[in-house]
Image (spheres, rainbow, N blue to C red):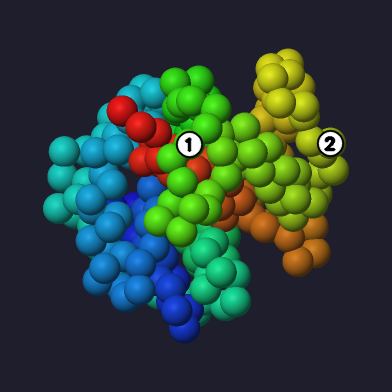
Amino acid sequence: MAGTGVAIETGTKRVFASALDWPGWCRAARTEQLALDALAAYAERYAVVAAAADVPFPKRAVADLAVVERLRGDATTDYGAPSAPAKFESEPMTRAEVDRMCTLVSATWTVFDRVVKAAPAELRKGPRGGGRDRDKIVDHVLGAECGYAPKLGLKLAQPELGDRAAISAHREALLAAFRAGADGRPMRERGWTSRYAARRIAWHAMDHAWEIEDRTDR
């Protein structure tokens, strides 16, 4: 994809901007322009993921942002998650494309784990006193991935917090499913394509990694 291709997903209350070639680089706001501005503002933070993946992050990634698809959102969009697959995400992938995608998704988990390890158990509360603490966020991310798994034709049991072997196996199962869907087809009826699943799962990990960073007292 030339430049930094972005999909814009518009609901009635929220708009997501997702960099389609960079799983996890995705931000939301009230309008399309604000979502694009937020995406650009997070480029430096996302570059940490690219570095963890050892994938070169272009210096012109922000300058080359270009909207390539506009998608209609739904109630999930307004609730706070990117919900609409892009046409691009139904295209078949080469072996190199699959490897790159899986490497970047793995890097989002690496960064998430690193952020969790550096954070205190109790996080700063939001302006209204809300927000999960660190371990609740980790539990939520793992639980959500288990909830996503059936969309990839998988059934995963949620790993226990701190069980590194089980968490690693859980993630390897997701990566294997991404690889199995390299032809661009959903792996079950009404399921997700690999590219969309990778984008959704990586977004969720990074959204909460950044939340933890932002709610950690320094």
Q: Is residue 98 above or below residue 121?
A: below
Does the residue at mark 2 contact the one at mark 1 (Cβ under 8 Å)? no
At 39% from the left edge and 63% from the top edge, which residue is drawn? 28
Type of the residue with mark 1 = Leu
Image position of 31 (left or right of 16):
left
Of residues 212 and 37, the one drawn nearer to the viewer in this rendering:
212
User: How busy is the neighbourhood of tag 2: few (under 14 within 10 Å), some, or many (20 plus)?
Assistant: some
Direction from residue 17 to residue 56 in the image, left or right: left
Q: Which residue is drawn at 26% across and 44% down?
A: 43
Checking the image for residue 123, the label placed there is: 1
Residue 124 lies, with reference to residue 118, above or below; the image says below
Q: Tell me, for residue 157, which label it has, or none.
A: 2
Where residue 200 appears, as percent x and y from the top left, is: 56, 52
Q: What residue type is labelled 2?
A: Ala
Q: How far apart are marks 2 and 1 (CA)?
A: 27 Å
Residue at the image position 31 percent from the left and 73 percent from the top: 32
Tell me: residue 83, above or below residue 98.
Answer: below
Quadrant holding the C terminus? top left
Q: Which of 181 and 142 is in front in this view?
A: 142
Q: Where is residue 31 in the image (x, y as percent from the top left)?
A: 32, 75
| Residue at screen point 38% across, 48% down | 25
Q: Locate residue 1, reporting x and y percent.
A: 34, 52
Q: Inspect this view and state whether residue 122 appears.
A: yes
The mark lying in front, picked from 2 and 1, is: 1
